[in-house]
Image (spheres, coloured by chain):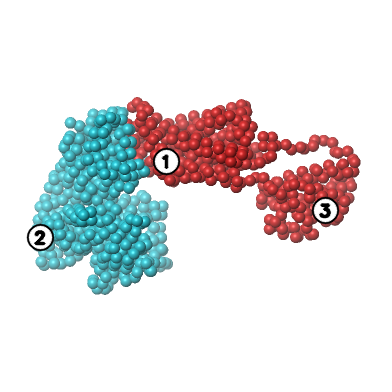
Amino acid sequence: MTFSFARTLTLCRKESKLILRDPSSLLIAVIIPLLLLFIFGYGINLDSNKLRIGVLVEQQSQPANAFLHVLNGSPYIEPIIGSHRAELVQKLNRSEIRGIVVIPVNFAQQFATQHATIQLITDGSEPNIANFVQAYMSAIWQIWLQQQNEDTLTTPPTGIQTELRYWFNSAAISQYFILPGAITIIMTVIGSILTSLVIAREWESGTMEALLSTPMTKLELLLSKLLPYYLLGLIALVICFIITVFIMHVPFRGSLLLLLLTSSLFLFTVLGLGLLISTLTRNQFNAAMIALNVAFLPSVMLSGFVFEVDSMPLLVRLATYIIPARYYVNIMQTLFLAGDIGSVLMINVLFLVIFMVLLLTITIKKTRLQLD
Amino acid sequence: MNQIILHHIEKQFGQDTLAIKPLSLTINSDGVTGLVGPDGAGKTTLLRMMDGLLSPTQGNMTVAGLNPLDDRASLRAILGYMPQKFSLYENLTVAENLNLFADLRQIHGQTRQDRFDKLLAFTDLARFTDRLAGKLSGGMKQKLGLACTLLGNPQVLLLDEPGVGVDPISRQELWKMVHSLANEGMLIIWSTSYLDEAEQCQDILLLNQGELIFRGKPTHLTQRVEGRVYALKSTYSHRQLLLDALKLPAISDGVIEGNDIRLILKPEQPIEPVIAALPSHDITATPTQGRFEDAFIDLLGGIKQKQSVLTQIMPTFNGSPNDIVIEAKGLTRTFGTFTATDHVNFSVKRGEIFGLLGPNGAGKSTTFKMMCGLLSISAGQALVLGLDLKKSAAQVRQKLGYMAQRFSLYDKLTVQQNLAFFSGIYGLMGRQQKARSQEMISAFNFQSILDKTPAELPLGFKQRLALACALMHNPEIVFLDEPTSGVDPITRREFWIHINSLVSKGVTVMVTTHFMDEAEYCDRIALVNRGKLIALGSPNELKQKVGENATMEQTFIQLVLDSESKMTA
């Protein structure tokens, strides 16, 4: 049976009409992406504003007062002075404050002997915030040490001084790296979940059996399932891009051509995954569940979109290598925040190409024009 | 002349399911060939193999000289296959569906226009080209499916149960179309589980459990029972008469027909001793024409289970047979602007079997669901045992048993667990629950299958299990929603024996059905069309409205058509 371009076009046209007429596919393709984008853009904010920290000064002294002064001057922290420990603990329990700093009784003596310590208590049930508190407190501690040294006119301790500077995202705004990642999630939803649902629906409704009884070829069938959703994915990409760059004001430093090429690559990869899932299950419920667990959740959890891959445990880190979204997140963050960095893009593109070829090959192998 | 030749074809699914036992035969394009058999007989598997959608495990076949697997491309050009389910795009219009399949078959230009015109006229769908396929009625959907299948002008046409879910009127139209195609020389196979459709065919392939049990003209099969079929008239209760007659060893099969019964005797058994053995003295027996279904059941050895043990385990409900137990007063249900049930009035007396009949989408399911409290009522009243369903639906439900379409059993629970669950939700507990389950288990012979799940059981068992679950709490009233669809004729006969026994204990039964022969079992029938009640009466009364010797099917068709012309006038 020979490939017919006209027949492919007909099938694509039919597919597009079905997408447009089915409210649920529009919901998945347009409403949910927009919702996700705004949630990620406005709702999730990994930066902390002024953290409220309880401070307990067990004994007044000059060094203790100086430390309090530094705390008061910090733009990140709002110290709440407590008179005794129980009161502050209660406030911590009620989440009114995020941590407690205890300046001990013998702080002045310790300071004199160069071995001063303070106690920092944080809420381990909110590890993210606890980390912020810890980081801010050590920064403040450094500032205070430096000031003390200047005041006492002693030479600052030698050794390496930490100095933070955020490259590519100098203001360290989390939207800047979340939004390019969010586009990955949206591409995954359209590519895998929507595609797998729609083809499984053809099996369930029996229309697949009718199609198989026409002269349609395997290539035509696959193309008709790939191209309309590819187009839909590109439209979603454009919408996301416009919102991200012009409404959320995330910078875009790479080239549009590279964005298009790499996105196409990723789209075909997830489309291949979606096709494969629905070809194997032929059932909407199973297809949705598998797509959710195989494509969507890993893209959220393991792609480095929210959780930094480098800070994951080794085993989980190894697992991220088989998540195509990981490479696309990397590409997107690079294109948006850094620009066309050839060496970074090349390796990610290479991995995506491997995944795409692999998934599409398996899909072609598994697609049969027969029922058994 | 086109031919389909099967040579030792065999199809196996999994390890031990033999869907088609070795089969060799030749099918010619000489009139419509009927592929007849109950559900699970292997009809769809056979058709799919002819279409190249399944490959046979053993053997080989040619369809119009082509091998379905190797010559797929050439076969597609000459073969039309209409799958069982409505397999067109519900979100595309009639015209879009036609265009899609014309494009796929690469039919262009003048040929395309000519075929469209011809098929739209042929199927009478020209008025509906802009309507979404999903919004068509069951009959129109099948016609559209047929039109799309015929686009390629096939030489071989395979139709998988085109009559399912289609009311008698649309079925009649479909048959007319198919007959005219067959006259033009097309090889047509029509598969069906409705045995009455077999009489329309030139040639019959009768399948049962993957095995060909008869091949030939339908009249050849009916000849088997010639001289053994009798219609019995009596003043005695026809239902009791049938139950009594079936207990006699000389009887192979028996059904109710209006106020009479039809009996099929075993070979070489005279009718006289049978009449003598029956309790009534005014019986007149007249020999009558055998039917395809009679012959089919006879071929399989007649019905085996001839009496229902339900009489022993169901309590007797006393009360006057003049008590009204179910009543609909101006019953109305609207969905948006659409009125599904429109001011319907009827009443059902104690111990009656009351049938609700109507074409697809006529509103019989809506009415039925309101009567058992599953659907809220827009206007009017539904009374069961004097209780208003609007106010005391829960109280009513405790007194009625409900058997849903497709049986609604839990497929993952075993038979025992299903029984325990359904007795539990009706409030049976402890020793009482155990005793009742045990009664059901021995009554319906569930011992050997207690640990199996319904998914592993044949439909007949499922149906009995569903009935057992619905009867757990000794309901006074039983609602049956298409209880026998998809079930083979023998199981259906046995099912009705159970229902007849229930009624003999004073239970009232309300039933919906698509089978016209089952309508005969009802004491009275309400015929619904477009939400309105168009006729109400006993099967005989309804038949007489149409003509002296009208069959139930002719009656149904005529009454519905009359109401259509009245409504549009």
**Disc 1: which residue:** A19
- Check disc 1 and report its element: helix, strand or loop: helix
What quarter of the picture does the C terminus of chain A occupy? top left
The image shows residue B327 at horizontal and vertical percentages of 29, 67
Q: Nearer the viewer, mark 1 or mark 2?
A: 1
**Mark 3, chain letter?**
A
Apparent side of residue A58 relative to residue B402 in the rendered image (left or right)? right
> Which amino acid, by three-letter code, is at mark 2?
Ala
Q: Is residue B302 above or below residue A20?
A: below
> Which amino acid, by three-letter code, is at mark 1?
Ile
Apparent side of residue A7 relative to residue B181 in the rendered image (left or right)? right
**Disc 3: which residue:** A104
- Which chain is red in the picture? A
Question: Which residue is at the front of the view, A257 or A198?
Answer: A257
Figure quadrant of residue B258: bottom left
Residue at position x 56%, y 43% from top? A37
Residue at position x 18%, y 31% from top? B1
Q: Residues within 10 Å of mark 2 (few under 14, many from 20)?
A: some
**Disc 2: which residue:** B285
Q: Residues within 10 Å of mark 3 (few under 14, many from 20)?
A: some
What color was chain B assigned in the picture?
Answer: cyan
Figure quadrant of residue B491: bottom left
